Structures are given as structure tokens and as C-alpha cells.
């Protein structure tokens, strides 16, 4: 499916929103979460730019699976480091190991279900962290209510990841055409929700 | 009035507006890197106008000289000079007048600035196009040096002298040029062969060319980042510059290890966006 001018414009707006977040950062953060958020929004920005340049064909590359893991892993690492001090080291180890294992299982040909299992576990933990942690923080009064938008962003990017993963696995939830039609808007909404949520912090 | 508009429409493609615009943006960014937060609009506009004239003028002169090559190549045979819509004498006159106006205005604004603008035009037209382009594939080094002159000129106009940061910025453009030109040379390899123009892929092969692109991309990204830090860009802007540089590096690496036509041309397009983005960041970082 060819990418349209409207798709490109939506992605361009998304890139600007992600770029804005990278420039402004989150006030008062330590170095590691700042790097983690920069990496997360950086991958979103680069994904948007590559889709603008190469069109939806870019999604067929095997590297997409690896790069799309970086977004939830880095954002969730930033959140855990910022808000769950007791789990910092544990989650950092999980993020690094999870990424490495995904790279290995995606690079070495395997006939069993290990690559899918690894992907599901790593994506699942990282995705649920981004989705649930902000809501928990809001409900316990530790952050402003608007911070729940970060959780909403997590839910949206999880939805996008799910649609694309099943599509690539050959068991699409929606048709390829529908998924590609909603993808630019979904990416923009995701990024906007993250940025608005973080600005509330 | 209609005749003038028709002529302008005919002349505009001779300036390669996108390439001229990109080089113009480097010159304006060079100036802003030195003048922010104090900036005079008349200086800024004068700089933009003189650089535009000088760059467009040299591009027209190049196109005048290379009209025989353009006529042979599929990609360029429809250009106004190559297909005869503009006569060579007309293009030469236009190129000379615009170049003299551009350099003249630059000299009037500042002798040092004018000298650098003239050097850029001289390297581009005389050394690169007239002398080396048809003799050696290494001519792109001189094309790169001339490409680095607008940013150096803008910086020198802002500071009043040539400094290390200006040279670093010019180096960044110099090393960015191979990413831009060599990806193009690979895409239109047959065209260049038909025109008998020596290019890197024909002299050293595609793999060496891809490696050259990757190395020069890394050096360009490092040079821009180093210049950005030395200029005193805010950390947020440095972070974004690092992200964009990472994208350039990853695409360059992908073009070495997983070379496809799509990745190659993606790198070409990304390199242009990268340079424009980097210049915007340098320009906006202190506003």
C-alpha cells in the first residue's frame, strides 16, 4: 500500500512532537531516565522519518521487530527509574538482557517458538509497565491526573505493536490495508499522549 | 509581465532550487551560530540574498558547462539547457550576472565574507566543474570544499574572522557531501557511465563506495555534534542532534551490510533531511 501525502503530513507532525519532547526533556530527571526517554522518543522520531522517506515498505524489514522493542523498553526503564527506586537495577538488567535476547533470537534462525515467546514476554512486561504504572501513580496521588496520559500512550503503542506483530506473524487482527491506514494517526496520538503526560509531570 | 514570468519559470530549474536552498540554509545557520542572540535583520537578509545569488549563479554556470553531459543522462536530459529551451549564451550571461551580483554584494557587506563566498564559487565552478569533474572521481573532495564555504562564510560574517568552529562546520558539510553525492552516483550509475564521468562506484566498486559513505557520514555527524557543543547549543538540542545523527549512522551501516536500492536512496533522502534538520537546530538553539 502506498503512503499518502496526508499520512506523510501526520507522520511529520508526529516527528515534530517527538523532537519537541527530546529537546525539552523532563524537568529534574537523572541522567539515565533522560537517556532512556531520549532513546524512546528518538526511535519514534526516526521511525516516523523512515516511514516518510521509504513508505510503508519499511515495515517489512526484519530490523523493525528489534527497533520496535526499543521504544517500550526504554520508556518503561525511564518510568521505573523515576518512580520505583527499589526496582531500578533489576529493571535495568531486564531491559538490557531482554533487548539482547531479542536481537539474538531475531538474528539466529530458529525453528521453535522461542523468538515469539521472548518477544511476547519482553514486550508484555515493558508494555504493561508503561500502561499500568502511570495510572497507579495517579490513583495513589503521587503524580498529577494528566500523567495518566502516559499510560494512555502506552496502551496505544501496545495496540499498534499488537496489530503489527500479528500482521507480521501471518495472523492479522485487521487487514493490512486497515492497519496501515490507521498507523500514522495512531503513532501521532501515541506520541502526543506521551508528551502531554510527561509535561504534566 | 507574462514574458517575465515565463522566463523566470524557465530559469528557476537552472538554479537547482532544493540544492541551493539546502546550501543557503547552511550559510544562514553559520551566521546564526555566531550572532545569536544578537542579530540584525538587514545583515541576515543581505547574507541570505548574497549567498542565494552566489550559489544559484555558480549552479547555473555549472549547468552551462555540463550541458553536454546533461543531454546524455536520462535523469537530466529534460533540463532547459540540455533540451534547448535556454540557449548556452543566455545561460552563461545569466550565470555570470547573478554570480557577480552575489559576490559583489558579499564583498560590499564584508571583504572577508566576500572572499570566502568567492572562494566557494571558484572551487565549485573552476576547480570542480571545469577542471576535475571529467578527469577524476576525487573531484567530489573539491565539490565538498566548495559546499562547505557557505557555512564558513556565514560564520565568518557573524564573528568577523575565521575560527575553529567555522572550520569544523565546513568540515561537517565537506564530509556530508559524499553521503549525498555518492548515493546519487550509485542510483544513477548507468547515466554517469553513459556520460563517461568518473565516479567512485566505477573506479572502486559499490562496496568501497558504501563504506566510504558510512565513514564520511560518521565523520560528518561527529563534526556537526562537536561544533554544536562548542557553539554552546542547549543540551536538549544536542540530544535531538544526536538522535538524528544516530539515524544517519544506522542507515549508512545498513547500506553497507544490507545494501538495497531502497536503503541507498533512503540514505540519500535522509542525508538531505539530516543536514536541513542540523542547520535548523543550530539556528534555533539560542533563539
Image: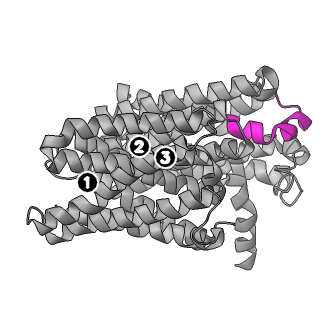
Residue that badge 3 annotates: A117
Residue B153 placed where, x, y %?
Answer: 45, 37
- At mark 3, the secondary structure is helix
Taking the magenta stretch, the answer to whether it contains residue B188 is: yes
Q: Main secondary structure of the magenta part?
A: helix
Q: Which residue lies most toward the left here?
A: A141
Q: CA distance from mark 3 to mark 2?
A: 30 Å
Q: How is the image coloured?
A: one colour
For label 1, the crowd category at 10 Å Cα-Cα, with few meaning under 14, some 14 to 19 and many 20 or more, is some
Distance between the alpha carbons at the discs numbered 1 and 2 = 14 Å
Q: Are marks 1 and 2 in contact (CB under 8 Å)?
A: no
Residue B147 in the magenta stretch? The answer is no
Residue B32, placed above or below residue B160: below
Give the labeled residue for mark 1. A24
Q: Earlier in the sequence, mark 1 or mark 3?
A: 1
Q: Are marks 1 and 2 on the same chain?
A: no
Q: State the SS at label 2.
A: helix
Q: Viewed as shown, does residue A117 lie left or right of A27?
A: right
Q: Quadrant of residue B203?
A: top right
**In this rendering, position of residue A165 left or right of residue B245:** right
Which stretch is magenta? B182-198
Residue name at image x 67 percent, y 53 percent: B15
Chain letter belonging to callout 3: A
For image coordinates 70% across by 22% down, the residue present is B208
The answer to which of A13 and B254 lies nearer the viewer is: B254
**Residue for badge 2:** B243
User: Can you give x and y, in whole percent of width and height, for residue A189 in the image?
Assistant: 40, 70
Label 1 resides on the chain identified as A
How many circles with numbers are drawn on the protein? Answer: 3
Of all chains, the one bearing label 2 is B
Residue sitting nearer the eye, A187 or B94: A187
Amino acid at each position: 500500500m502506498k503512503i499518502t501525502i496526508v499520512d506523510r503530513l501526520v507522520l511529520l507532525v508526529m516527528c515534530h512532537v517527538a523532537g519537541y519532547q527530546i529537546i525539552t526533556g523532563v524537568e529534574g530527571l537523572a541522567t539515565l531516565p533522560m537517556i532512556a526517554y531520549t532513546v524512546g522518543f528518538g526511535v519514534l522520531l526516526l521511525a516516523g522519518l523512515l516511514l516518510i522517506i521509504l513508505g510503508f515498505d519499511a515495515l517489512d524489514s526484519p530490523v523493525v521487530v528489534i527497533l520496535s522493542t526499543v521504544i517500550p523498553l526504554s520508556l518503561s526503564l525511564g518510568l521505573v527509574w523515576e518512580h520505583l527506586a527499589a526496582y531500578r537495577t533489576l529493571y535495568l538488567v531486564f531491559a538490557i538482557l531482554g533487548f539482547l535476547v531479542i536481537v539474538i533470537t531475531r538474528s539466529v534462525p530458529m525453528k521453535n517458538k522461542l523468538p515469539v515467546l521472548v518477544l511476547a514476554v519482553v514486550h508484555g512486561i515493558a508494555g504493561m509497565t508503561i500502561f499500568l504504572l502511570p495510572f497507579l501513580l495517579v490513583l495513589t496521588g503521587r503524580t498529577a491526573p494528566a500523567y495518566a496520559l502516559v499510560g494512555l500512550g502506552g496502551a496505544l503503542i501496545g495496540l499498534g505493536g499488537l496489530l503489527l506483530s500479528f500482521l507480521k506473524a501471518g495472523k492479522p487482527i485487521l487487514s493490512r490495508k486497515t492497519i496501515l491506514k490507521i498507523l500514522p494517526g495512531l503513532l501521532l496520538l501515541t506520541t502526543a499522549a506521551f508528551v502531554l503526560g510527561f509535561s504534566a509531570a | 509581465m507574462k514574458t517575465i514570468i515565463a522566463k523566470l519559470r524557465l530559469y528557476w530549474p537552472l538554479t537547482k532550487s532544493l540544492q541551493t536552498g539546502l546550501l543557503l540554509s547552511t550559510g544562514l545557520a553559520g551566521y546564526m551560530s555566531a550572532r545569536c542572540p544578537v542579530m540584525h535583520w538587514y545583515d541576515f537578509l543581505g547574507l541570505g540574498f548574497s549567498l542565494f545569488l552566489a550559489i544559484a549563479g555558480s549552479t547555473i554556470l555549472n549547468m552551462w558547462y555540463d550541458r553536454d553531459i546533461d543531454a546524455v543522462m536520462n535523469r537530466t536530459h529534460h533540463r532547459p539547457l540540455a533540451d534547448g529551451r535556454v540557449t548556452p549564451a543566455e545561460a552563461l550571461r545569466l550565470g555570470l550576472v547573478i554570480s557577480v551580483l552575489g559576490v559583489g554584494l558579499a564583498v560590499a557587506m564584508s571583504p572577508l565574507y566576500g572572499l570566502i563566498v568567492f572562494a566557494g564559487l571558484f572551487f565549485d565552478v573552476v576547480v570542480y566543474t571545469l577542471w576535475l569533474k571529467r578527469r577524476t572521481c576525487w573531484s567530489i573532495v573539491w565539490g565538498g570544499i566548495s559546499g562547505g564555504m557557505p557555512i564558513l562564510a556565514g560564520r565568518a560574517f557573524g564573528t568577523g574572522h575565521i575560527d575553529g568552529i567555522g572550520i569544523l562546520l565546513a568540515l561537517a558539510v565537506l564530509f556530508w557531501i559524499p553521503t549525498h553525492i555518492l548515493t546519487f552516483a550509485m542510483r544513477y550509475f548507468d547515466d554517469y557511465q553513459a556520460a563517461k564521468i568518473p565516479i567512485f562506484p566505477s573506479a572502486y566498486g559499490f562496496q568501497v563506495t558504501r563504506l566510504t559513505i558510512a565513514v564520511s557520514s560518521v565523520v560528518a555527524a561527529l563534526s556537526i555534534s562537536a561544533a554544536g557543543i562548542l557553539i554552546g547549543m542547549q543540551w536538549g538540542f544536542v540530544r535531538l542532534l544526536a538522535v538524528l545523527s544516530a539515524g544517519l549512522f544506522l542507515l549508512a551501516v545498513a547500506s553497507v551490510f544490507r545494501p538495497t536500492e531502497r536503503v541507498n536512496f533512503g540514505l540519500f533522502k535522509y542525508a538531505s533531511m539530516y543536514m536541513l534538520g542540523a542547520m535548523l537546530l543550530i539556528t534555533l538553539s539560542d533563539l
